[in-house]
Image (spheres, helix red, strand yellow):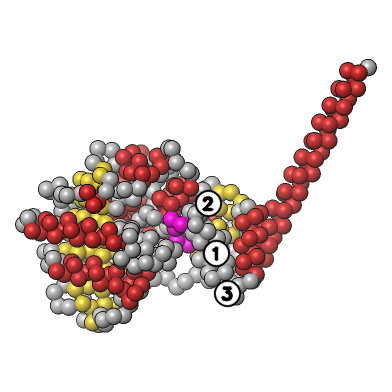
Amino acid sequence: MSVVSSGRGRESDQRTFHEFTSRGAADSATRRSRRSAGRSLRVVGLFAGIGGLEHGLSLAGHRTELLCELDESAFRVLQRQFEGVPVRRDVRKLHGLPAATELIVAGFPCQDLSQAGKTAGIEGRSSSLVGEVIRLLRSRRQARRPIPLVLFENVPFMLHLARGRALEVIISALEELGYRWAYRVVDTMAFGLPQRRERVFLVAALDEDPRGILFADRVNQPPPQVPSPSLSYGFYWTEGLRGLGTAVDAVPTLKGGSTIGIPSPPAIVLPSGDVVLPSIEDAERLQGFEEGWTSPAHEGGRPSLRWRLVGNAVSVPVAQWLGGRLADPGHPFEDSWAEPVAKNRSWPRAAWNCGGGRFGCEIGTWPVAYERIPLHEFVASTQPLSERATAGFLARLSRSNLRRPRWFDERLAAHLRRMQQARHREQADGAKQNGSRAKSRAAAASATND
């Protein structure tokens, strides 16, 4: 099935989340029958992670020929979920690509670029691996078998870090190799998933206008929702001093790490007043995967590994939309309202160079607008935020000047009281049981003595 906005009315943009994250075989068959009617590309996935990009592209009718992923846990997931597709370990040892390769996709490591990471920039040990993609492209160009299309994915922070040096390095190399390029920031929320998640997608093409892939679909983004006790309120309980990472009727961006150095889920204040954590299966669905997609990673590893893998993944329906437009690009993009990109400054939210220089604009992050079910109905398996985590977060929050709704603190405090009362009841019940057992032992001992 294609999740592309065809421009033939809003009906195509108002599909529900369940259309592209079905759990049953029947729905999967329906999804396959609705693939894009355009071209089918042969894909190589580098830095594939758990295959979000490649899975979404396959749902749009494209075929994965080769995957490359160094992380052991992600490697196990790829082997299970992409049966029959060769999976290589280290991109630095990859000296060639399948001859029929038409599209390289690379969600290169973002740990050195993201605000949750070390912000070392493109020279960081992880993020500098994007140079391996350029090496492979250059090698094929020199062999007169160039790769027609390239798709990069990364965090929006790279548009600003060191005045956008990361992006400058990448696009300068692409321009040197003769590629036209365009990029756009896209939000997962547009695809019916209750997760606020913005990512940069850059398409480079040798023989076509990449703007027909990235900019053909545009809708008016709805105004931000106002926090309300009647709506769920997602936040990161590991924060509380310098930020909250909140989202209204959604969770904030799922991350591969946190300020306390471990992968952790966001918390949710539900309309009922309960404060809960989503399960890893909920997190998989929040990224558009089927439940259990990352279960192979748990074999021989820690359960927290799955959170890291999901947090680093590309949302599947976003990749499927991109796959639809790669299969069937839209109309030529009208750029009369664009402005030249200024040098040595942060990059705009969208930009391109298709032969006439670098131009940018502030196009919205919603290419489509699918229906989204409320977060409290979406999450299927939750557990309460622990007493210790709640108390720690409230303590940090009390020392901060962060703006938040008044009821937010009140509901957290009420949740903490309930957790404390539950612990006291459990302790009292335990004491009663211990007392009863002690009396039973004393009575048994007395009977024996008699």
Q: Nearer the viewer, residue 26 or 410?
A: 410
Query: SS of the residue at dot 3?
Result: loop
**Residue 48, percent across and down?**
30, 51
Helix, strand or loop for the magenta stretch, by majority: loop
**Residue 354, percent across and down?**
16, 72
Q: Residue tagged by mark 2?
A: 278
Which part of the image, by quadrant, shows the C terminus?
Answer: top right
Q: Residue tagged by mark 3?
A: 403
In-image side of 293 versus 68 (left or right):
right
Q: In the rendered structure, which disc, 2 or 1, sits on the residue that comes first in sequence?
A: 1
Residue shown at the point (8%, 58%) measured from the top left = 142
Q: Residue furthest left?
A: 144
**Residue 180, percent across and down?**
16, 68
Asked if the stretch drawn in magenta spans residue 256, the answer is: yes
Q: Which mark is residue 239?
A: 1
Amino acid at the residue labelled 2: Pro
Asked if the stretch drawn in magenta spans residue 54, the answer is: no
Q: Which mark is residue 180?
A: none
Amino acid at the residue labelled 1: Glu
Q: Contact (CB < 8 A) between labels 3 and 1?
A: no
Q: Residues within 10 Å of mark 1 (few under 14, many from 20)?
A: some
- Kindly report the distance in space between the C-alpha atoms of the residues bearing marks 3 and 1: 13 Å
User: What residue range appears in magenta?
Assistant: 250-257
